[in-house]
Amino acid sequence: MKQFDRTALQGETKQQYERMQAAPVTVLQIGEGNFLRGFFDWMIHECRKQGLFQGSIAVVQPRPSGKDNIGKLAAQDGLYTLVTRGMDKGTAVARNELIPVFSQVFDPYTDWEKLTELAVSPQLTFVVSNTTEAGLVYRAEPLGEGPILSFPGKITYLLYLRYQAYQGSSTHGLIFLPCELLEGNGDVLRETVLHYAEDWNLPQTFQDWVRLHNRFLNSLVDRIVTGYPEEEQAEAWFEEWGVRDNMLCTAEPYHVWAIEAEPEMENILPFRTAGLNVHWTSDLKPFRERKVRLLNGAHTWMASLGLIHGLEHVREMLEHPDFGWRVREAAVKEIIPALPYPKEELLTYSREVFDRFANPYIRHRLSDIAMNSVSKFRVRLLPSLAYYAERRAPLPEQLILGLSGLLRYYRVKLMEDGTYAGTNLSGEQYTVRDDPEALNLVAGIWSATELTGATMKETVDRLLALELLWGQSLAKWDGLTTAVSYWLTQWEGEDAK
């Protein structure tokens, strides 16, 4: 079967590709992974199709270990297919589309000079990234002549080259659009860049130029991009298309991008004009809180409960005769009232969330969502639970059930290989991935219960009192220990006194 590259193009798709190749590089993209290709690059393609955006993208991988993907993408002349499947406002959607937006695809660790040349290009305007949260951190690194390993260190050096090339011109700064899932991602990137600048003794005038004449925009992204599909599905599509696309990517229809910037940014990034769900806003907090509390919160609620009951995927939880209605009730009747935003907007968002969860083409593994569940619960669900506790209102039943599921999931023991494992209600073993210090504390309390014969209520009280886990003692909240003990007793058949 023929490999997918520019020679496979015909008609309008060939013309789209040729127009893109002739366009100047206005975007440097750090990250070749599924998310940016199914999110940002698709958005740029939508703008280009409508004649709203005239530039092209140069893409590089953020780490030396990413050379396999960048090599595959380069072998396909930067081309790939995006398949979008799922529900969009109650209507089933299934479409596939060629995405021709990359005019340059290269490995910056073997072609460092090419990246440094791009850094001083007068047409370069934007830098978009997705290096994961781990990529937006400072790691001491010397400033040498060769490739710089860290993402923010690399950006610092490239900005310094640009500063020198244009003698600190106020009109030659860049606009950064970090997509890492980190609160204040733009602010974090700017401060990390300045940390490197100071560490490398770069001039104060350069540091001032970074602050004053470059934009580091905080943003919040949301789209489920599932990447390469199951092999059987991929092979069926390749047979139908007559070409093999090694960089095939799949995504859901839903997407939203909230960017902290003035509405006039639409003049140079015309996303909304292209019909995309992008919001220029002065405050990301409402977008972030509704996503964290409703979408992420529902995920965390489902993960532990589902796993201890032997379920594997999000969709199984939605279709479960008991948990399906409970998770919806947790969202609508318990989480939404605890948020200070218009109820109708939140209800609409909640419906969108559960439509996404029910997407038959997405298999979200609960075990993946369950990683670091304690810290996730603390951020995603505990604020809603605290809303009721602080007002001495009746504690919300479904949120308590979620907390109970979390504590039962963390009934773990230290194994010989250094991991922590628990067993579900059917006796099947699973591994819990979280902070070792937290796991050790929790395992010690559960172990003491077995050794001393402590009651379930005593055990729960000790678990809820762990300030390392919750940031405060939840054991002080009226009625919480008793309510959680009820569920654990039901599952374990143990004395709750």
Image (cartoon, helix red, strand yellow):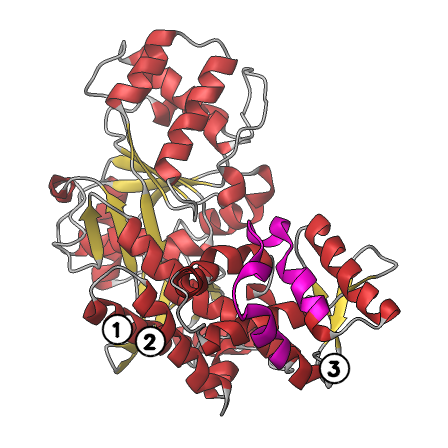
Q: Which residues are magenta?
A: 458-487
Between 471 and 306, the residue placed more toward the observer is 471
- Is residue 383 placed above or below 191 in the rendered structure? below
Query: Within the magenta stretch, is there residue 152?
Result: no
Asked whether residue 229 is in view, the answer is: no
Identity of the residue drawn at 50% across and 29% down: 111
Question: Which is more N-terminal, label 2 or label 1?
Answer: 2
User: Label 2: how many residues lie within 10 Å, few (<14), some (14-19) or many (20+)?
Assistant: some
Asked whether residue 5 is in view, the answer is: yes
- Residue, disc 2: 332
- Is residue 107 placed above or below 48 in the rendered structure? above
Q: Give SS at disc 1.
A: helix
Q: Nearer the viewer, mark 1 or mark 3?
A: 3
- Residue, disc 3: 495
Amino acid, disc 1? Leu
Q: CA distance from mark 1 to mark 3?
A: 40 Å
Q: Please, which residue is most extreme toward the bottom here?
A: 321
Q: Is residue 325 left or right of residue 481?
A: left
In the picture, the quarter occupied by the C terminus is: bottom right
Task: Give the main secondary structure, helix, strand or loop, of the magenta stretch.
Answer: helix
User: Label 1: how many residues lie within 10 Å, few (<14), some (14-19) or many (20+)?
Assistant: some
Q: Is residue 59 left or right of residue 442?
A: left
Q: Residue 230's spot in the image, x, y percent?
A: 54, 73
Identity of the residue drawn at 29% across and 55% down: 287
Image mark for residue 151: none
Q: CA distance from mark 3 to mark 2?
A: 33 Å
Identity of the residue drawn at 28% across and 48% down: 284
Question: Looking at the image, do the residues carrying marks 1 and 2 touch, with CB atoms under 8 Å apart?
Answer: yes
Q: CA distance from mark 1 to mark 2?
A: 7 Å
Q: Residue 180's spot in the image, x, y percent?
A: 43, 46
Image mark for residue 347: 1
Identity of the residue drawn at 50% across and 75% down: 363
